Image (spheres, rainbow, N blue to C red):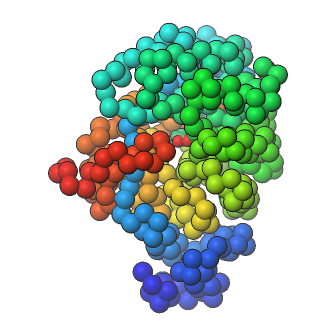
Amino acid sequence: MTAESIRDISSDKDLITIADKVFEGKRITDEECMTLFEKGSLAFVGSLANYIREKKHGNITYFNRNFHIEPTNVCVFSCKFCSYSRLYAKRDEGWELSIDQMVDIVKSYDGKPVTEVHIVGGVHPKMNLAYFIELLKKIKQHRPELHIKAFTAVELDYMFRKAKVSVEEGMKILVDAGLQSLPGGGAEIFHDEVRSIIAHDKVDADGWLKIHETAHNMGISTNATMLYGSIETYFHRVDHMKRLRDLQDKTNGFNTFIPLKFRNANNDMSNVKESSLIEDMRLYAISRIYLDNFPHLKSYWPMLGRQNAQLSLSFGVNDIDGTIDDSTKIYSMAGSEEQTPTMTTEQIVTLIKQAKRVPVERDTLYNIINDYSNVES
Ligand code: V47
Ligand code: SF4
């Protein structure tokens, strides 16, 4: 792909200026990002995103072997898009796992080559900081080498406020107990015009960013998500990514950006239509172009569906998350076609190879565990 060949795809002056910048390795502005959303065809943004992806990672596509623990779906908050939570008042409809039950889940992976446990759930008023300290310690006691990626900034904000500790103190306590990185959930859309409607009662944008900044300052890596395709406009998406890019300039602590497609089943926003596949792929591509300081772009297949996740590997994505082992319910409850999200390593390797990419198993921090390029599938 060259600057000349992109001119065959578009003759629009503004788009050509953006393409020239990308080929010169320069950062695009917020206005240029808006232009891409408004005028960039899938072929145009896809070609640029693929150029960046191949410059950063060649054909490598990462995945990991992980499983999820969802401690509870009881939640004190009431996000309108959530199909998963049961209000505390209706908690008999939900589940609440004890520490022993969660440690038993970890034990059920004994002897299996998983490298990460991802722990996230609803915000249960009785599951407090002390509860999670005990959980982290017990998991580490049982399997010290298992990486614990746990708790969204929403869960942490509530935990710390209830325990009356500062973000710095709370993070230190959890890290001492075994926490090693933070997932990217709870970011939704930062701009208050949208957040006040879809997620009015949980941590706001500044609170979310402050928790991630604090983690980065302690050397803890984190991810960042964006819940797209509900009621936000292109402006809100650019604003969201700008806040992430600015923080990343400061700390360089984000590993991965993960766009999460809004799914509309069984929630209070079922009247909102889901985005089209072409808009999904345009968003992946544009985020790859705009977030020049994020090393990785992940498509989360349980939410997008495995075939669309496979397609996204041609639109900037270089990471396809993990094998997951049917251990998350968030997306099946929100209407994803992936009703039992589990893929064997062989299936994930085949999926990546079919897209003519090179499958590489990583750990949470992107250290390479296994290169599958020469494994027959
Ligand atoms: O914050 C909830 C989203 C997130 C819906 O960091 C929904 O590696 C779409 O953050 N439609 C939690 N999205 C999941 C998450 C995550 C997942 C995988 C990997 C990582 C990582 C993080 O799920 C929530 C919210 O944004 N969500 N309901 C819905 N109806
Ligand atoms: Fe609770 Fe998270 Fe659902 Fe919001 S998205 S209601 S914080 S479980």
The spot of residue 234 in percent (x, y) is 69, 62
Q: Residue at x 52, y 30 (%)?
A: 148
Q: Nearer the viewer, residue 367 or 222?
A: 367
The spot of residue 116 in percent (x, y) is 45, 33
The relative height of residue 29 versus residue 69 in the rendered view (above or below) is below
Q: Is residue 97 visible?
A: no
Q: Quadrant of the N terminus?
A: bottom left
Q: Residue at x 20, y 51 (%)?
A: 375
Quarter of the image where one finds residue 165: top right
Quarter of the image where one finds residue 16: bottom right
Q: Residue at x 29, y 51 (%)?
A: 371
Q: Quadrant of ligand 1?
A: top right
The relative height of residue 50 versus residue 156 in the rendered view (above or below) is below
The relative height of residue 369 versus residue 339 in the rendered view (above or below) is below
Q: Is 282 positioned to the left or the right of 5 in the image?
A: right
The tally of labels here is 0
| Residue at far left of view | 376
Q: Residue at x 81, y 48 (%)?
A: 192
The spot of residue 180 in percent (x, y) is 56, 34
Q: Is residue 119 visible?
A: yes
Q: Is 11 positioned to the left or the right of 321 in the image?
A: right
The spot of residue 137 in percent (x, y) is 55, 18
